[in-house]
């Protein structure tokens, strides 16, 4: 076997869940990049044996990689230097954005001939670290003295870890950039003031006493503040006294009493009658004694971008709707016209033809009614009403609805104990769960297992719903969340689209992983309540 690209989802063993938990703890415990990556490598070594391992960070501008953390490479300093990304495995991993597994005699591999040291490696894997659509680094493991080759399961496990690690790297790099900005602010305040007055982001800095020593003009513009702002104003005066801005104030208040050092969220606010979409990120900057901290609030106005996306989305949906309406109109027209044909009127089978054509017309009209009803529910979806809740309660209530499901369908649950609370609209989340479970049951006409798992990871609560059904063909998996795409004869193609929108409105995301004739897994990720905000 020369190479394998990982595409399947892996069932995670208890020991690996523990490692996942340790990595999650590591990611939330520090923003010092070297410490974070060292902790990740230590945790991974407990479940995947390797002689060497490294996490390499990618410089997109210079197209170079450099080792930021490693083990088993103490006497190989030549590998620590910057590596130009031109050829070889690293170039392929970055180019294809897919994990890579190499086994066998690596000395004769065409992409490794230029690298002298690969002759001693018996097996290697390399996984891209991708955050916000960009490759930020590569996770490498190799075996020299260990006889067994790496397996697809090893590759799948490291790939599973790679997402949270990449996000943590991105956050740590962002934290370092902001921290450096704050250091510069102390020594070159006037210069920083000039920079802040001209950047496109809103910046607010508040100290331990909630006083705002700095707020740039863009922050004033984004928040639609029309009153004088001074450097003695407090956070309470800026946010709490203006009801339109209270969601941002609540985020900041919860953040300041929590142990988190970085958080971000998006808000759809109605400020003085104007619908405004704002992304807010908060970062803590600690003093040398670690007892006091200042908070930097970074604001981005996404109003115009969201409005443009909405217009484009509605245009696309309108085209789909017109197409879907046109399809049944043709057989309706043919059926009606045939009844007016003189030859058919004089046919001895005229009444039979009338019955058949009438049934065809009724069938197509009902299909149109169903389509329009679904479209109407999608267009009139209410705003989510978020309340603190326990996801396992909502899951159990939904599962109880299927207590009388066919006996050949077994529903199993694996709920993580003491999972964090979530802020959700329970009824809307239940609607999502019902839709997904219904699809899963329909995908197992001969019976099977439906497994529902919960786990907390990197400030998110994950719900995993897996069936052992017929699966989804690989060539259409990317389309299943698109409006009006369906493989069901009577489907409208809006069910999963509505589910995806509900989860997105909760600040989460939904992913579908499937293998034909083996089953499908739907993963729902919802933001967990921060420490200090649980009730």
Image: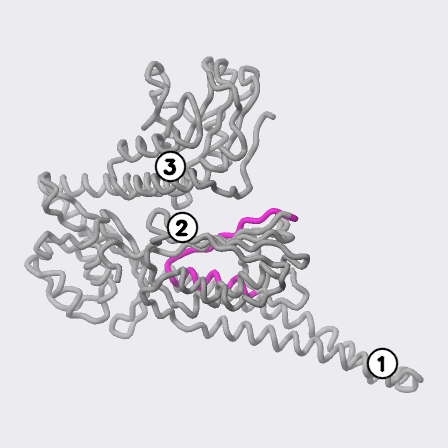
Mark 1 highlights which residue?
353
Which comes before the other along the chain, label 1 or label 3? 3
Question: In 3D space, how far apart are the residues under numbered discs 1 and 3 (Cα atoms)?
Answer: 66 Å
Q: Which secondary structure lies at badge 3?
A: strand
Instruction: Report if residue 257 lies within the magenta region.
Output: no
Point 34% across, 64% down: residue: 389
Quarter of the image where one finds residue 492: bottom right
**Mark before the other along the chain sequence, 2 or 1:** 1
Front-lying residue, 181 or 218: 181
For marks 3 and 2, the one nearer the N-term is: 3
Of circles 3 and 2, the one toward us is 2
- Magenta residues (range): 494-517
Q: Judge left or right: residue 393 versus residue 490.
A: left
- Name the quadrant of the C terminus: bottom left
Q: Residue furthest left?
A: 232
Q: In the image, 471: left or right of 281?
A: right
Q: Which residue is mark 2?
A: 455
């Amino acid at each position: 076997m020369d190479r394998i690209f990982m595409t399947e989802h892996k069932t995670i063993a208890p020991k690996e869940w523990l490692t996942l938990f340790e990595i999650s703890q590591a990611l939330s415990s520090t923003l010092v990049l070297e410490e974070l990556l060292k902790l990740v490598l230590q945790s991974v070594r407990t479940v995947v044996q390797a002689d060497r391992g490294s996490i390499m960070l990618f410089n997109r501008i210079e197209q170079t990689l450099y080792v930021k953390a490693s083990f088993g490479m103490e006497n190989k300093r030549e590998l620590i230097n910057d590596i130009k990304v031109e050829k070889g495995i690293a170039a392929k991993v970055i180019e294809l954005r897919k994990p890579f597994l190499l086994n066998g005699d690596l000395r004769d591999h065409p992409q490794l001939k230029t690298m002298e040291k690969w002759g001693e490696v018996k097996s290697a894997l390399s996984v891209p670290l991708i955050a916000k659509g960009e490759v930020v680094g590569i996770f490498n493991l190799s075996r020299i003295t260990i006889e067994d080759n790496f397996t697809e399961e090893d590759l799948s496990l490291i790939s599973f870890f790679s997402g949270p690690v990449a996000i943590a790297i991105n956050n740590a790099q962002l934290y370092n950039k902001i921290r450096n900005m704050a250091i510069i602010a102390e020594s070159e305040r006037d210069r920083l003031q000039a920079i802040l007055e001209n950047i496109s982001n809103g910046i607010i800095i508040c100290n331990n006493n909630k006083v705002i020593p700095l707020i740039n003009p863009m922050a004033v513009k984004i928040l639609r503040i029309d009153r004088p702002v001074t450097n003695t104003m407090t956070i309470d005066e800026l946010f709490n006294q203006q009801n339109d801005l209270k969601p941002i104030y609540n985020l900041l208040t919860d953040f300041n009493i929590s142990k988190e050092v970085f958080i971000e969220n998006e808000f759809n606010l109605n400020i003085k009658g104007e619908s405004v979409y704002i992304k807010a990120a908060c970062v803590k900057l600690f003093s040398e004694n670690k007892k006091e901290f200042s908070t930097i609030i970074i604001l981005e106005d996404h109003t115009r971008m969201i409005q443009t996306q909405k217009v484009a989305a509605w245009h696309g949906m309108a085209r789909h709707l017109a197409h879907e309406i046109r399809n049944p109109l043709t057989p309706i027209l043919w059926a009606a016209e045939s009844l007016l044909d003189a030859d058919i009127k004089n046919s001895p089978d005229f009444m039979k033809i009338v019955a058949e054509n009438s049934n065809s017309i009724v069938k197509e009209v009902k299909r149109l009614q169903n389509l329009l009803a679904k479209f109407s529910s999608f267009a009139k979806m209410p705003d989510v009403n978020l309340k603190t809740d326990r996801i396992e309660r909502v899951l159990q209530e939904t599962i109880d609805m299927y207590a009388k499901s066919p006996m050949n369908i077994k529903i199993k649950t694996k709920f993580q104990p003491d999972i964090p609370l979530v802020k959700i609209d329970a009824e809307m989340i239940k609607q999502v769960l019902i839709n997904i479970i219904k699809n899963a049951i329909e995908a197992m006409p001969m019976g099977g297992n439906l497994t529902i798992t919960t786990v907390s990871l990197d400030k998110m609560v994950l719900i995993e719903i897996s069936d052992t059904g017929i699966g989804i063909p690989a060539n259409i998996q990317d389309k299943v969340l698109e409006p009006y795409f369906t493989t069901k004869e009577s489907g409208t193609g809006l069910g999963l689209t509505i589910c995806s929108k509900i989860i997105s409105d909760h600040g989460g995301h939904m992913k579908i992983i499937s293998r034909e004739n083996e089953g499908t897994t739907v993963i729902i990720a919802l933001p967990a309540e921060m420490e200090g905000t649980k009730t």
